[in-house]
Image (spheres, helix red, strand yellow):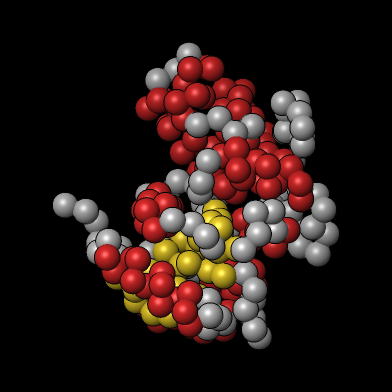
Amino acid sequence: MTERLRAVIADDQALVRTGFRMILAADGIEVAAEAADGDEAVAAVRRTRPDVVLMDIRMPRVDGLEATRRIMAGGAGDTRVLILTTYDLDHYVYAALAAGASGFLLKDVTPEHLVAAIRLVRSGDALLAPAITRRLVERFARRDHAHPALHRDLARLTPRELDVLRLLAAGLSNAELADRLTLSVATVKTHVARILSKLGLRDRAQAVVVAYETGLITPGGAGR
């Protein structure tokens, strides 16, 4: 039986919210609330405690980036934030990932992709392909001076865990990591889980950000 999921849709365009609501409802995902700006989104999350928030970036009063920060700072529990953007490489999206969002989607996403993304993020994975997040981070890492980096002490990681983090940030999937390191996929997943736990990270999206911001891997490079 498919797990019942609850979502909040935050977008300043009513038509967009209606479209997303219909897509989610058709797949059995309950829309717990809708929000037209960041303030409403934060209030809706606190009130309904959804599994996933579909968060637009550009909204009046409080934008999606600030709303994401407030949600994460306010003790979001297991709620995951999925950023929605019109543009493929929006510097706000990088800042949102650093703030705790679990990934991003373009607004022209297909219904099937949207539903799959919500379920993927809810399972604790990052969205979407690591290579997409890597490309985003490569462009904006160390350039967003308005917001602090995700400072983490990589000394907590074992040499093997550093290898896993480096390859994860380079865009490799779990299967590719397993092949490269001659490990089972289950062992790779264990390493990833330990990395997230030791560094206090929510998911792989933040792990990619940390790998770049600490210099473990550099834009265009294979890591140190």
Q: Quadrant of residue 63?
A: bottom right
User: Going 39% across and 58% down the picture, which residue do you hit?
Assistant: 111
- Residue 110 in the image, given as x and y percentages of width and height: 44, 56
Q: Nearer the viewer, residue 157 or 180?
A: 180
User: Going 48% across and 57% down the picture, which residue do you hit?
Assistant: 109
- In the rendered image, the quadrant that contains the C terminus is top right
37 to 134, vertically: above or below:
below
- Residue 65 in the image, given as x and y percentages of width and height: 64, 69
- Residue 107 in the image, given as x and y percentages of width and height: 54, 63
9 to 144, vertically: above or below:
below
66 to 184, vertically: above or below:
below
User: Going 61% across and 45% down the picture, which residue do you hit?
Assistant: 133
The answer to whether residue 35 is seen in the rendering is no
The answer to whether residue 102 is seen in the rendering is yes
**Residue 147 horizontal side relative to residue 39, left or right:** right
Q: Give the residue at the far left of this rendering.
A: 1
- Residue 131 in the image, given as x and y percentages of width and height: 60, 38
Number of numbered discs: 0
User: Going 21% across and 53% down the picture, which residue do you hit?
Assistant: 2
Q: Give the residue at the far top of this rendering.
A: 182
**Residue 142 horizontal side relative to residue 165, left or right:** right
Q: Nearer the viewer, residue 207 or 31?
A: 31
